[in-house]
Every structure is written in structure tokens, then in C-alpha cells.
Amino acid sequence: MDEIVWARDSSEGFILSRITEILDDGAEVIPLESKYQKRTLPFSDIFRANVEKDRDYDDNCEMMFLNEASLLNNIRTRYYKNKIYTYVANILIAVNPYSEIPSLYSPEMIRNYKGKSLGQLPPHVFAIADKAYRDMQVLKQSQSIIVSGESGAGKTESTKHLLKFLCHNWGEESGLLEQKILDANPVLEAFGNAKTTRNNNSSRFGKFIEVHFDKSFKVCGGHISHYLLEKSRVCSPDGDERNYHIFYMLMAGAPEKLRQKLGLTKPDDFNYLKSACTRYFTKPSSEKKLSPSQKSEDHTKQGPLKDILLDDVEDFNDLDQALSRLGLTDAERLQIYATVAAVLHLGNVAFEDNPDDSRGGCRMIPSKERSLITASTLLDIDPSELKQALVSRVMQSSRGGMKGTVIMVPLKVYEANNARDALAKAIYSNLFDYIVNKINRSIPFQASSYYIGVLDIAGFEFFTVNSFEQFCINYCNEKLQQFFNERILKYEQELYKKEGLGVPEITYVDNQGCIDLIEAKTNGIFTLLDEESKLPKPSYTHFTGEVHKAWPSEYRIGLPRSSKLKAHRSIRDDEGFLIRHFAGAVCYQTKYFIEKNNDALHASLESIIQESKNKLIETLFSTSMAQKGKLTFVSVGSKFKTQLGELMEKLKSNGTNFIRCIKPNNKMVDHQFDGSLSLMQLKCSGMISVLELMEYGYPSRTSFADLHSMYKEYLPKELKQLNPKTFCEAMLHSLKLQEKDFKFGITKVFFRPGKFAEFDRIMKSD
Ligand code: ATP
Ligand code: MG
């Protein structure tokens, strides 16, 4: 009755406790630390504990008891020792340290990890990069590295380290191409990252960066695909959040002459930048070195590793040079900056009710003329035509059978605001596409044989108000989770079967049902949304009703009032739906779904901007014209569905490596581990299911060849000469490991949890 166990605790995750009484369906436990209360828990909240205090394991599978409590404890113990990386078999867990760990990413480290099998050195993001590289060489197959985690967990930082490793210049050549691939990042961050309440440098788009290799496995090019840039941020960053970094960089960091030319003054002068936090000029990247004094700044206010006004000058210069190295000429760069400035000036154009218009139309507020003219000049379009297109729209009348008569419909104030914002969003997001395109063109990969693709895309999201953006990103995470299940859980079980290891099957939740709900061709939510847009008078309440009607008996979808959260229960039935995702139920508010799914400009506005004489603007809008020619309107949702489909195809045909990033606290501070927050993330990322599977299986496995090379130095000469398989058999049988603790497969030896570590100790101590 004295057994020490892990007992669930709502804030710590788990706490060590002693069982005092076993009950029918649970047990009574007393926590070892007296600050915690005695409690009665069901068996599902009590786990066996590895009791060696403060001991930690590089690979969780070395532990005797594999369960969520021991995993959490191992990660926490390591984190406080500055060991932020941990394996669960081949999956890397990375905890965000929110501080720089000295020399963790030094060039020497890169060299150390080159060519080493996983497990030879402590867990590291470089070890995963090297594994991908070696797998590519040996298996002759392209590889993916899927980096996941919630906002602020460290995906983008991990991605940068992976790319740095993959693009490390091993040869004698100058490494220009590698530099270009690395240059892409500061550019993407400047235009696609922003300060949010969760992360001072939050990526507001997803990306899949491919590093291509030629037949001798040297870097020969790259390609970037990007997903779902958050357009709404351009016009309305939330209260405490900022707009995209580029706006502030340009404002504070561009040379005086350029700023004058673009009419840029200070953020508070621009509607799109007015928010509570404009006074903080965060830097877009944390790559720079810091003085110790900066590191000890008040993190809660400004976030770690950043925030000094002066940095913007340096950041702007870095960006400008990166763009220049990527092959953009002085004129092209100037045009980009002018376009960014034009978005800001456009945002200052405002409207009021027009007392002279009997139909309730609006007019531009006269004092905003200056902004209109500056915006038009920068975009090289006619200001009066722009004004006209913002306050009215042209429609074809079919009254009295006179089809084709063109009439001008005046817009109301809110409609004009919407038109202006739609234009700003279109310009900015087309500019982002253009920049990615430019980068891609400067790193072509004709000589490619294989590639390693790194996916950095937002994890599962769940807020008080969830809209179309969360819907899309959670859909994406359902697909990725399904892929993870197939690759890890299904693959593992198939492997056991194939090798005849006789492990009982683990059931895991198949989320195909949830994916169908969203993407099914006839009645999936995306389809219903597109259908709604085609109606003469689309309405979100009608759309919501259709969704509920289409899936009457599907348990994965529900009414808002079935939510556990009070805030959601007050949403009307026709204003939202609840989806039970693999990671939890999310209630979506459908109010802006229709608008957010449609990023087309109204025709008059589109034609004005297309008539621009500015070369860049012309390019930005020429593709949408091509689409128009085909008369196919592509909604945001269906475009994303297609893109995601293509990405999944790539992932399926590649070898896979997973990195799960964990955010240890919500305050963005170092050395603070919030147990329940971290546990939640481990659950959402599917790591707990992996452990369950491993607990009954053979989680540590090594190929005969690796085992041979790792231990040959510990054994007598005659053994060394044996072939790897015979060598391993001889070695394992000569030790006193029990037969049930390991099994021989066709290519590998498999060990029960904790047994490989035991074997390693025996070998090294003998
Ligand atoms: P989002 O989804 O919002 O883009 P993310 O997962 O990409 O979030 P990052 O931007 O990579 O998160 O990380 C957030 C911050 O955490 C970084 O700006 C940096 O300050 C810190 N950080 C992350 N990883 C590390 C690391 N390995 N070492 C030091 N600091 C780190
Ligand atoms: Mg990011």
C-alpha cells in the first residue's frame, strides 16, 4: 500500500503521491508534498511512477513506465536542466526555453551532429535534420519534417535551425544558394509575422519550405509554398496586437528620404496601425545577440529577446539587403515599399453619410483627400476614379428587359469602408504572393533529385471567439493528425505484425468523420459555404442552418449550446456550430464566414487597380484577371482545400519526421513550466496515444548495423568481425537480458520500454 504514483492535478498536471486506500473504481492518494490536498481519483488519473528522483531520459522510451505522467515529468525535469529536447522514439519534443541556451546552435554543434545516428548524441533539432538528410541518401526518398505546436511554441525558430543545418555550407563553394534560401526567412517574417498576445513574432501564415538536393546530395535550390496569410490583420489588428512587422520597420527604419517620399510619419498617424501597442517596436526576428541586461527586461510587457526602438533601422537594412541578395533591383524594392505605404494611406481614407444623396449613399470625408491622393500616386491610379469606385459600384441593370444598362449604385458608409479594406487586403496579400514568387524564382531547382521539406504551420486553435481562420487551421490540423496517426500509430502496429511481435492492437480515434464533415464534396461545410455565396442574398444564418440540416445525426457537429463554455452557449443556433475535433470541441461563430471566404474585389474596384501604370501593381493583379477570364470564382476555403490536398500528397510520398513544439508557459518567460498547459499540448499533438502504444510494444529499436557500430569497441576482437545481425545475436544472448525484453525482427532489434537503456548500461559497465 506504499506505492508512489503520479496523481492527476489540475494545475501541475501530475504530482507524486502515495496510495493510501484502493477503492472499487479508484484510489485515495496523499501527495508527497504537504501543500497539496489528499484526494480520491479514478484509476485513469493514477499512473505508476519511475521513482529515481531527478533522473531524466534522452528518450522517453528508456523509461520503465510509459504514461502521460512520466512523460510530463521527464520533460519538466529536463527543461529545468536546460535540456529542451527529448525523444519519444523518433519523434522530437522541443520545449521553448524563451532564452538563449549558450552554444546550443553553434557551428560546432552543427558539425557534431553531422552524420550521427539518432540517439548517439543528446536529442537535438539538428539530429532530426541530419536523420532526414541521411534517410534521403540511404532510402533515396524525399523527406518531410513536420514541425507543429501552438502559437509561441517555437515552430519557426525550430524551422530556422533545421534550415540552417540543411543549408550549412559543407563544401568549398561560396554557398550563395544556401544563403539565398536562408535569406527567405527574414523577408517572410517581415511581411508575414506580427506581434500578437501569444507571440511577439507570430507567423500569420503557414509554410512548407523545400530544400532541394542534386544527385550528389548537395543543395541545388529551394521552393516555398505558403498558406492562409491572415489578411484581416492588415486592416484591423486586435486591440493589443500589431499589424505586420514591415509597416513599423519601414516607418522607423527606412532612411529619412525614403520615408518622406512615401509620406510615412509615425504609426499613430495611420488607422491600420492605431492600436494599444504601437509604441512597442518589436523586432521581427530573435536571431540577434543580446546583452545580458536586455535579457533581464520585464518579459511580460515586451516579451523576451526583443524590443528596442533602434533595432528597426538595423532590421530594415537587413531586410533590404536580403531582398537585394534575392535578386530584387533597387527599383523593384522601392516599388514594394511604395505599395506597403499605399496600403497605409488607403487605410486613412474615410467616409461619411452624403446629405445630398437621397438613396443613403456616402461620400469621402473631404479632409481625407490628401490620403486618397497619396495612395493613388503610390499605386499609380487615378484618384478621382479610385474615389468613385470606393463610394459606388457599377451594376448591370436588367430592369424593363433592358439588359446591359449600366447603373451606379451608391454605397453606404460601411460598404465603402469594406470596399476600401478589401482593396487594401488584396494589395497586401497579392504583394505577399509576389514576394514569395520572387524568392522561388531566385532559388530554382532544375537539378533536383530529392528534397527535404519543412512544414511550419499553426497548430490547433481554440479561442473565446473562433471564426473562419480558426476553422481553416483546425481543418488543416485534423488532416495532419490523421497523417500522424497513419504514419506513427498505424505504421507501428503494422511493423509489429510484420515482424511477428504479437503486440495487442491499440485503438485510436480515426478522425476521417471530422474531415468529411468539413471537406465532403456534396455536403461538407466548405461546399455549403460556397453554395451560400452563390445565392442572390447570401446570409450567414441561412448558411449555419444549412450546416446543421446537412448533418443531423453526426455526433461531431453540434449546436453552440452544447458547448461546455458559457460564452459559447449564448451564441444563437443559427449563428454558429460546434465541432468536436480530435483535440477538443470548438465553437465557431459563423458571422463573417461568407465575407472571409470571398476575397474578390467588386468589379469596378478591380478594373481600376488593374489599369494601374505601375509595373508592380499591374503584376499583382494580372493573375486574378487570368482567373476571371475563366469565370471561375475560387473561394478562400476551396483554394486552401486544394493546396492542402497537394501538400498531403507530398507528405504521403515522402519519409516523415515529426517535431512537436511545446510552450511551457503563457507568460513568455524562461524557467517556468506550467504542467497542465504542457500536458494539454502533449495530448493535442497525439503524443499520449503514441505512449500508450509504446507501453505495450517495443518502443526502442535499432538496426543491427547501428547496434554493431555503437558497441563493437566494447567487445572482444573475434566478435567484432561477425556480420551485424550475428553480432547482435551473440551480444544480446551473452548478456543476462531476459528473452521477453527484446525481440529480433528482420532488420532490427526491438526492446521493451526501459530495456534498451538497461542493456546500454550493462554494456558500458562490463
Ligand atoms: P506562431 O505559431 O505564433 O508563429 P511559433 O511556434 O512559430 O509561433 P516562434 O516564433 O518560433 O513560435 O517562437 C516564439 C519565441 O520563442 C521566439 O521569438 C523566441 O523568442 C522564443 N524561442 C522559440 N524557440 C526558441 C529556442 N530554441 N531558443 C530560444 N528562444 C526560442
Ligand atoms: Mg511561427
Image (spheres, grey):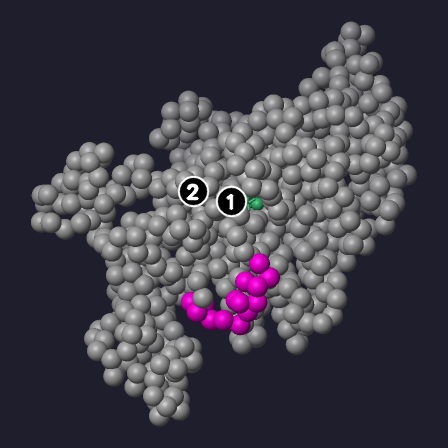
Question: In the rendered structure, are the residues bearing label 2 and label 1 in contact, judged by CB atoms less than 8 Å apart?
Answer: yes
Q: Is residue 122 visible?
A: yes
Say whether residue 612 is magenta.
no
- Looking at numbered disc 1 in the image, what kind of residue is underneath it? Ser
Q: Is residue 199 visible?
A: no
Between 352 and 134, the residue placed more toward the observer is 134
SS category of the residue bearing label 2:
loop
Find the residue positioned furthest to the top: 355
Towards the viewer: 500 or 659: 659
Give the percent coordinates (x, y) of residue 400.
79, 22
Which quadrant: the C terminus? bottom left
Mark 1 C-beta to ligand 1 under 8 Å = yes
Residue at 39% in and 63% down = 89
Q: Which residues are magenta?
A: 106-120
Residue that numbered label 2 is attached to: 671
Q: Which residue is mark 1?
A: 99
Rounded to the nearest angstrom, the CA distance separating label 2 from label 1 is: 9 Å
Q: Position of residue 752 (x, y in %)?
A: 28, 68
